[in-house]
Image: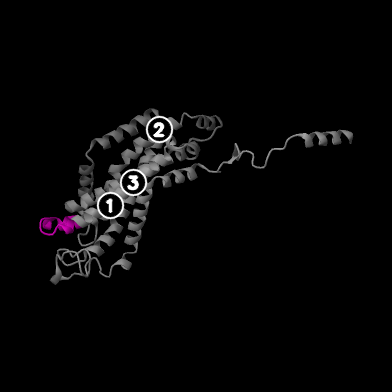
């Protein structure tokens, strides 16, 4: 009993650790953050990235809620007595060569253009990241074969290869997505492989191998999560490039349905009237430029947020 009392008295004399230990340094409370919270914080510190995000939110909302912002059908409503009307009056942005409202076609066409860009980036990302993970992690013959095939794909001119695929498959929105995804995945593959070559030699990956974990578990639990930052950046920038490329294919007359609204098809429709009614091409051109610019600003913000050198 006496020994217990002596031990209790000794413990009472020892200084007790404050409840905030580990959360304060020099009297200043340290915020409890994690990796993704830090990424979000750095992203919102970039003013241009925030502006781009707000612009994209507005564009997506207006395109998705197009019936709220226009009373005209982009295909059915044709005023043959009122063709190529300049902007103003009931038609804010004028009418096209068959009397359709340009504003309504711009809103509805944004759905197709933005959705095409997102789908192309997702499909290309899945293919490219898979190839890059397998090539970088296993190395050897597998790496050599996959990377040489990737180099062959990169040796072809991007748009020429997309046009060739479209010519073989036929004109449809699905084939536009397929052709652009097939020509876009090599960039993801090379970028992912370079990341994997660095990550696979790290201590935690070596420890997982020593522990007997299967390759699939190591790839998806340890390697892939550490490539997500680079993947998200590349994915964002690819969306903008895919929107431009899809518009280019439609401008060349490869749109699946020339009556359906799409920004590239609108450029093609206005091409014969460029000197007399320039608004038919400049309006969809400005819409494409603003959208791609906003996406690029978001991509730049994500690149800075994921870059460890930007963290302090």
The x and y percentages for residue 13 are: 78, 35
Decide which of tag 2 and tag 3 comes sooner along the chain.
Answer: 2
Residue interval drawn in magenta: 265-281
Q: Residues within 10 Å of mark 3 (few under 14, many from 20)?
A: many
Label number found at residue 290:
1
Q: Residue at x 20, y 46 (%)?
A: 163
Label 1 to label 2: alpha-carbon separation: 37 Å
Quarter of the image containing the N terminus?
A: top right
Between 302 and 29, the one lying in front of the other is 29
Decide which of tag 1 and tag 3 comes sooner along the chain.
Answer: 1
Check the image and name the residue furthest to the front: 27
Label 1 to label 3: alpha-carbon separation: 11 Å
Q: In this orientation, does residue 44 appear?
A: yes
The x and y percentages for residue 25 are: 59, 37
* 274 vs 91: above or below: above
Q: Locate residue 6 relative to residue 137 in the image: left or right.
A: right
Q: Residues within 10 Å of mark 2 (few under 14, many from 20)?
A: many
Label 2 to label 3: alpha-carbon separation: 30 Å
Q: Residue at x 21, y 66 (%)?
A: 101
- List the residue tagged with mark 3: 297
Mark 2 or 3: the one toward you: 3
């Amino acid at each position: 009993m006496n020994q217990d009392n002596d031990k209790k008295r000794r413990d009472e004399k020892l200084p007790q650790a404050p409840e905030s230990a580990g959360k304060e340094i020099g009297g200043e409370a340290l915020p409890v953050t994690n990796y993704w919270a830090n990424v979000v914080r750095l992203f919102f510190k970039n003013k241009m990235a925030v502006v781009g995000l707000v612009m994209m939110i507005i564009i997506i909302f207006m395109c998705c809620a197009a019936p709220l912002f226009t009373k005209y059908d982009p295909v059915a409503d044709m005023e043959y007595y009122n063709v190529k009307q300049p902007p103003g009056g009931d038609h804010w942005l004028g009418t096209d060569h068959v009397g359709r409202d340009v504003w309504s076609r711009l809103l509805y066409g944004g759905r197709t253009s933005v959705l095409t860009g997102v789908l192309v980036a997702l499909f290309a990302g899945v293919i490219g990241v898979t190839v890059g993970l397998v090539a970088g992690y296993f190395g050897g013959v597998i790496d050599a074969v996959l990377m040489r095939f990737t180099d062959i794909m990169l040796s072809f001119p991007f748009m020429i290869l997309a046009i060739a695929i479209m010519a073989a498959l036929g004109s449809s929105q699905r084939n536009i997505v397929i052709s652009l995804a097939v020509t876009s995945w090599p960039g993801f593959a090379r970028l992912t492989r370079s990341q994997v070559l660095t990550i696979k030699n790290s201590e935690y990956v070596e420890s997982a191998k020593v522990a007997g974990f299967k390759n699939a578990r190591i790839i998806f639990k340890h390697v892939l999560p550490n490539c997500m930052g680079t993947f998200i950046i590349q994915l964002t920038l690819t969306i903008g490039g895919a929107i431009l490329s899809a518009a280019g294919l439609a401008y060349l007359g490869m749109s699946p349905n020339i009556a359906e609204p799409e920004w590239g098809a609108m450029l093609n429709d206005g091409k014969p009237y460029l000197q007399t009614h320039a608004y038919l091409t400049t309006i969809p051109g400005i819409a494409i430029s603003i959208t791609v610019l906003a996406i690029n600003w978001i991509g730049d913000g994500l690149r800075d947020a994921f870059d460890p050198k930007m963290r302090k």
